Amino acid sequence: MANGNVVTTTGRKIAINRIFKATPDYLAPSQFKVGTGTTTPVVADTGLQTPVDITTGVQVKDVLAGYPSLDETNMVATTRTTLFTTDANGNTLTEFGLFNKDGTPKMFSHCVHTAIAKTLSVQIIYIEKDIIT
Amino acid sequence: MLTKVRIGSVDVTSHLVKYEYERTYGDLMSEIVFKFITNVNAAITLSSGQTIEVWRGWTTSEDEKIFSGYIEKYEPEGGIITITALDKIWDLVRNEITKSYDSAVDPSAGKISEIFIDIVTTYGGLNADATSVQDSGTTIELEKFVCNHTDPFERCKALANALDWQFYYRADTDLVYFEPKGFTTNANTLTVGTEIQKVPKWNYDITEMINDLTVVGAYQEVETTETGRIGTTLGYETTGIDITFEPISVKVYADAANPPTTLKTGGVVDSTTTYYYYVDKVKKTIVPKPTTAFTNNDYFIVQYSYAQPIPIRQFNDTSIASYGLFTKTITLSDIRSVADAEARATNMLAKYSTPFIYTTLRVINNSTLDLKVGQQIPIVDNISVPAVSQNLVINKLRINYPATYDEIDVGDKYWRLAEFQSNVMEKFKRLEEQELQNNDLLTNLISVNNTSLSPIDVDNRYVKITTQTMSGTNLFILGNTSYGVLGTNRLGATGVGAEVNHFIAQKGNVYTETFYDTDFKETGVGAATWNTGARTLTFNAFEQARSIAIDYNNGTITTATMTVTSTSGTYTLQMSAGASFQTVVSGVPFVFATPGTDLRWRIYEAAGSTGTITQIVISAYH
């Protein structure tokens, strides 16, 4: 396993579509998934390797209200998401991905990280910063 | 070499003195010139248009059919008759086609190869099918292809030019072929001194280069309306009305009422008897009939159509940087949309933006080489300087009888096509210039390519994961079976632990700090100033700056390289992998005494003065 974090090719498609189309075809990323996969993320990824339920039967959760926040001076977007103590318990989490809310949600970014054992006692905050250059 | 020549059904080989057969790369007809002794007339009465066929061989005289066509002319010269014949492509010249291939309606659906097959078989009377015509695909298609009382040969050339393909007739299969240039590869290699009998003279030429191309296509007729009042509106006088564009067709309404409803009659000076106005296209003026004038204060509506050209411009930066600027404007009259013009421009630019290489080779004549125009064939010349070893296309093949060698022109230039195109282009340009001579509406479509010079990139900067651990009973979380127990857990949140780092990773495991934010600044430590506006880290004497973890719990760190960019000052640079800070040298890989999983940096101003740092990069730690 190798940790890593990438903006996927799909993520770039979302970006270019939303930059140049008056009526974009894709929604902006506004929800996330977590998982237990350990394969190094690559730009061709379209989903988490092994997503898990955050709440029963539901694998997605909205990012925190007020996010993404945009720094238009430095062209940085900050996304903050939280897994509450009641979310995704019983999993050793190693994956995180930002998704939009298209009919079939598209994955904007994929991160594989050091494992966290998720229990009732643990709340996890994910902070992702993306930049346009 | 053995040969056989038949005119009609009569074998005239015994009367043959010699022939020279020439087939040219591209789509022109091949030609063969015979010399017969005069007594061939006793075998057959010659006439133009008779069929003539030629074979050659090494085992029998009919091993390979090399020509099938028609006598174009015959010329007695004393005891010799010279006969010139053209191959069956001539049938495409002798016929006529009038048809519009509309992609929305016609079965060809805009696919160029299908249009070609239909033209050749239906209007040329020749054979062509899926075995001889390559599928042109759907990337380049024609929305509309108009054939208006023209010969099929000229239309086939237009299709070939659009794709930069070739077409030709093969006598051995009796089929017309349509394919990309250099489509087939000859597996044989021609080497100077082995198959090639003479050291060739190589030519490198950039005189046909184009790397800044403007394609002017056909015009689109556009309608417009202009209104005014004689004596009041600028340009509306009793002596004439100025309009904006050079008109193609005009309709004029004029009377005292506003809006005018009386349609006036147009005419031609000294040609029409009764008319109200005529049109001076050059001056773009509606003029009253000579010796008359428009009525002062009358209202006029001028409805007219004019030609709007569809030009497009593209350029090749790499070729311009290598060879300088080569600018060309071409006019293609069969373009009917911007998409067509763009496709043709892209194709031409790809072909003409690099130099051409060409030469003539004398190749031994045998049955194994199977040379054909349009083939790519490896050429090796280790005698010339510089040496040549590359695949080139056979542009022309000359077969002589009697002779022990064939001649081929090879290269990636195609003078005849380029010359033909330039001649045709000149003709089109003259026609188009006449049509668009005074058209002052110029639509410039310029292609701006930012993909290499100024690309937009969306990328991840870093990911940070923190955790909060719950403990004790001084918290109540609804739905949590450990911390939501009535009678045990108390409302409040003092049992919620602080947010602590679990994982921090930079994109690609490279940390670049340019101080446009303070995400990685350790607050309360050090007096150096992070100037997010100026994007600098400034120091006064002996001041310190320190970061929080820039990589955390992302794998063991044993080495790292810190590179600092500054505009002034002298510094002590330090890094820690989690145990303690150690002094490092900018740009030099450092091995930590104690590996760890918490990478940070620290900088001191070391000269008792001031200083400014603009960037810190830490890399090579994973």
Image (tube, rainbow, N blue to C red):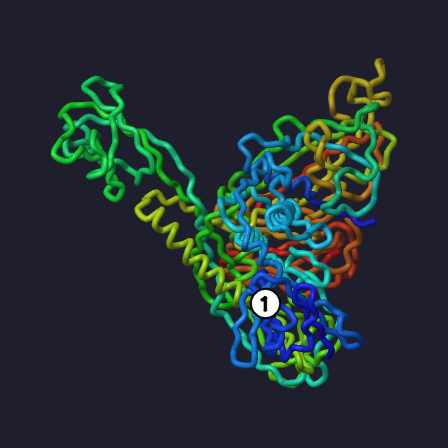
Residue B525 visible here: no
Residue B436 visible here: yes
* Residue B204, horizontal then vertical, whole percent: 54, 74
Give the residue displayed 76% in from the left and 41% down from the top: B502
- In the image, residue B577 sits, relative to residue B260, either above or below, namely below
In the image, B369: left or right of B301? Answer: right
- In the image, residue B350 sits, relative to residue B334, either above or below, namely below
Element under disc 1: loop
The N terminus of chain B sits in image quarter: bottom right
In the image, B143: left or right of B7? Answer: left
* Residue B280, horizontal then vertical, whole percent: 24, 40
Q: Which residue is mark 1?
A: B46
Residue extending farthest top: B487
The chain identifier of the residue carrying mark 1 reads B
Give the residue displayed 53% in from the left and 48% down from the top: B96
Give the residue displayed 58% in from the left and 76% down from the top: B359
Give the residue displayed 65% in from the left and 75% down from the top: B399
In the image, A96: left or right of A67? Answer: right
Question: As rendered, which of B159 and B597 lies closer to the eye?
Answer: B159
* Residue B81, horizontal then vertical, whole percent: 56, 76
Q: Amino acid at mark 1?
A: Leu
* Residue B580, horizontal then vertical, whole percent: 73, 55
Question: As rendered, which of A22 and B208 lies closer to the eye?
Answer: B208
Residue extending farthest right: A90
The C terminus of chain B sits in image quarter: bottom right
Circle 1 crowding by C-alpha within 10 Å: few under 14, some 14–19, many from 20: some
